[in-house]
Structures are given as C-alpha cells and as structure tokens.
Amino acid sequence: MVLVRRWLLGFLILQAVKVCKANENEHEKEPTRMSYFKISEEEQPFMARIDRLASSLKEETYKGSVPFELKLTFDFVEEYKKTLNKTEMTAREFKVIQAMVQKYQILKRRQRTLDNREPAKRRESCYDKLRLPISLVSVNYTDVYITGLPSNQDRRKPFVDLFGRKVKYSFWDAVSKYDVEIPSADDPEGDIKLKPNASFSPFIKESAEALSVARGWKLGASDPAVKIVPGLLYESQIPFFRNKKFWMRDMYDIEITTALTHWSLWNEIVSKDSKYAFIFDDGVSIDSRGFCDVGHAVKYLENNLKIEWDILYLDIEIFLGDNIEDTLLINNLGLDWTKVDFVYGSYAYAVSARGVKKLIAGGLERCIVPIDEYLAYMINADAHPRKQYIEEHCGFIKPEVFLALRWRGTKPVYKHINLLDDYKSNSENEDPNASDAKIKVTNEALNTELSQSKNSKESSVSDEKATITNEEGRIDNQANGMESTSSDEDVHIEKEL
C-alpha cells in the first residue's frame, strides 16, 4: 500500500509538471478563466492532499512564524520528498506545488463569497422557438450597442441576423490605435493626440485636450500588490496570475483605445437620454433565448422590484466573489440577480442612466487605465489592490453608491475572441478552450505512455491505484464548510472546494 501511495503521488506531481510545461511562457500562456477557477479531474486528488494538510494545520488557529500558505507549501514538499524517498526536488516541481497551494487557498476563500441559492428559473416564453421573435419585441430593449472596429464586418453580420428589426441596436466604432498617437510609457505627460485625418465621435473631439494615459502603471515583481488577490484581498506568497499578466507590463495600445471607446459610448448613451443600454463586444455571440430572459428580468427589476441599479454584468471574465453580506438586497432581488463584489469583464454588460453618468463623472478620460480596472474600482475601490495608486495618480471620483449586479440565469453570451489575444495574434478564430484541450491531450498521452509501459503485475497495482485515487479525490465539503455549487449562475466553475 505504501508503494502504491508513493507511486500515486509521483504520478500526480508528474501530471502537474506536464500541465505547467504546457504554459512555459508565463506572460503569453497564463491560466485562463476556464482553467483557473475550477478543479480539473487530474487536480482533484492533488487538491485532496493539500486539503488534508490544511485541515491538520487549522488556519483559523494557526500561529506559526511563517505565513500559513508558505507553511502549507513546505509541509506538502516534505511529504512529497518523504513519500518518494527524495532528498531534493527540482525548481519546476516546487513551482507547481506553490501554484497548487495558492489555487487551493484562493478557491476556498472565493467559495465562501458565492451566492449559492438555487438557480434562477428561466422564462419559458423565451425558450419557445415559435414565440421567440414576439418575446424579443415584447421586451422592448431601450438600446443595444456592439463595439468593434468597422473593418471587422464579418463579426457584425451575426448581430444583424439575430436582431434584424426586432431589437433596436447600433454598431459603435471602436477607436483604432492607428487613429491616435499614444504616448510611450516613459512620456511624463501621457497625452493622447488625435490624428487629423481620422474620424472620431464628437465626445472625443470635444475632450481632445484632456485625453491622457495613466503614468507609472507597470509594477515590478517585488511590488506587494502583485501578490494580493483582487476582491478577496488575500495576500499570497506568489503573484496572482492576473496581476502578473496585466500589471507587470505597460498597458497595450488596445487597452487604451478600448477604454476610450467605452468612455465615448457612455457619453453617447447619456446624449440619447436612454433609461439603460446593453453593451457587447463584437467578439461575443448572443444566445437569443438567454438574452430574451435577461430583458424580461431587467424589466422586472425596473417595474416590479423598483430597484435602482448602476451596472449589470451578463457574463464575467474573472469572477472574484459576490457581496452576500447584503442579505436584505439579495433577497429582494429574487433569483435572477445577485450583488457582485469584484469582477473583471467588459464584453457584455448593461448600464443604467444613473450608472453611466457616474462612470463619466469618474474622470476616466483624464487618466486612462484598462476598462476592466476602472469598472472594478468604481464598483468596489476598497477591494482593489491598487487603490492607493489609482487615488494618487488618477483621483477618480468614486460614487458613494454604485450598485453592480450579475446575472444568475441561463448564459446569454459566449465569448469567442479574447481582445488581447486577438491584438497579439490577429487571429479571429481562436478557440477559447484551446489551452484546456492541450492539457487534456497531454494527460491522455501520458496515460497511454504509462499504460503501455506496465506489465501484467503492475496492471493489478494500477487497479488498486485507481481505487485509491477515487477515495483520495473526494473532498469532504460539509466537514470543511466548502460546499460546491452546480447551479448555472457560475458557468465558469465545474468543481469547487
């Protein structure tokens, strides 16, 4: 049995190393939202061992001389070396263990913040194919905008085919990096200059003298902020993957022009005196049934619940928790919506008349940062690790109240094109699940290789190993207060701690 356990632990470490090798370049191939916020089948036994160690250490009463995460990492390393009779380990093995322990700690905290009520009930009228066009018309959306470069006409056609005359929609031309002169990172002024022959919205032209990019955005590896998980404010021992990917470099041109695009669109919405408006990036596809459901739910918020909201997230890129402490509001919202605490994602959202005015008043155009960072700060500035930087460098006017809700019903949009990946590769056909597919192929190849190398005697051991894997892969959710959720509200999580 001891030999089997040693073999099993070695096998798990080997698989984790294989996964890590698939992401060799850390800045180009970071964990995606689809892979980071769930526990894969291969990771489950691995996480179970970390969970057992964490339970024995008891973080709530831990008073060691080193941070709990570091202690947990060291204990796992020692168990790993002892089990396999190793006196030392490779840097890559240690890095994998660090990453897995960090993921365990983050998911455990994130799970505690989730709105785990039953899933929202869908409106059957939206899912009757014969009545769908009528449903879309009856919802009477105020405005729908699709942002994107006019050169990408192939991305606009699906929206035309879907909406037709049933929904009032418009294409909002994104600002191109070729139409503006973006200052270099070391330019002390940071002013954006408009090129004379380019076409811009009147709002950009009127504010041309004020347009400026935030200075000093890039953080060094030693900056404490890169280790603090946004929203959760958990201080890890290694950088959080998103912080490392987006903060330890200068802003890309497309991040600057995208923020400018959204800011100019907000001004357009105010000029139209709209009650609210939906904003989609042209890299998404819309599920008409889910969108119909959202439309009715928004109407219900307005007409029946009488709840004044500022921004609604229809889908989320990086989701770091709900605000479940506001139980009175959550109960009043019903099952369709919940109050969100901290999110990243600006490719599918809605803004109300009061919300969009607050966003404009914040002053984004004077100190442009990535749009996701700006929205996250406006929603919950206190939970943003870079709050001090933003206050000192940008001085955004934070509203006293900014109610952000997220949709809990059937998924209304699907993101097909990642803005930054599209910017780097110019590929409009990238599969968002490509990294997960590569991991799956790697694991299948590894299993095949191991299977072919075993003789009949080892085959019996393999059967016993599979039994142990099933036993150790189970995490006692009730004992550890980390119930998993299978509701449709969080489509990015398959299995949580």
Image (spheres, grey):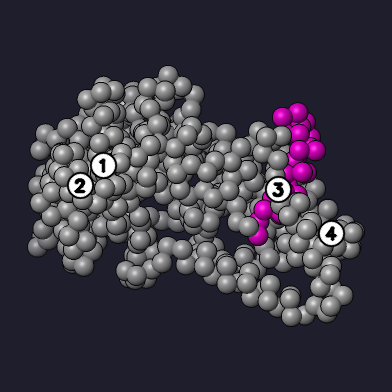
Residue for point 17% across, 53% down: 163
Kind of element beneath mark 1:
helix
Q: Are marks 1 and 4 in contact (CB under 8 Å)?
A: no
Instruction: Give the spatial CA distance, label 1 vs label 4.
Output: 54 Å
Instruction: Give the spatial CA distance, label 3 vs label 2.
Output: 45 Å
Q: Amino acid at mark 2?
A: Arg
Q: Which residue is mark 4?
A: 5
Instruction: Give the spatial CA distance, label 1 vs label 3.
Output: 40 Å
Quarter of the image with the C terminus is: top right
Residues drawn in magenta: 42-67
Q: Which residue is mark 3?
A: 474
Relative to the observer, which residue lies in front, 123 or 466? 123
Asked if residue 346 lies left or right of residue 129, the reply is: right
Relative to the observer, which residue lies in front, 471 or 301? 471
Mark closer to the chain start, 1 or 3: 1
Q: Which residue is mark 2?
A: 131
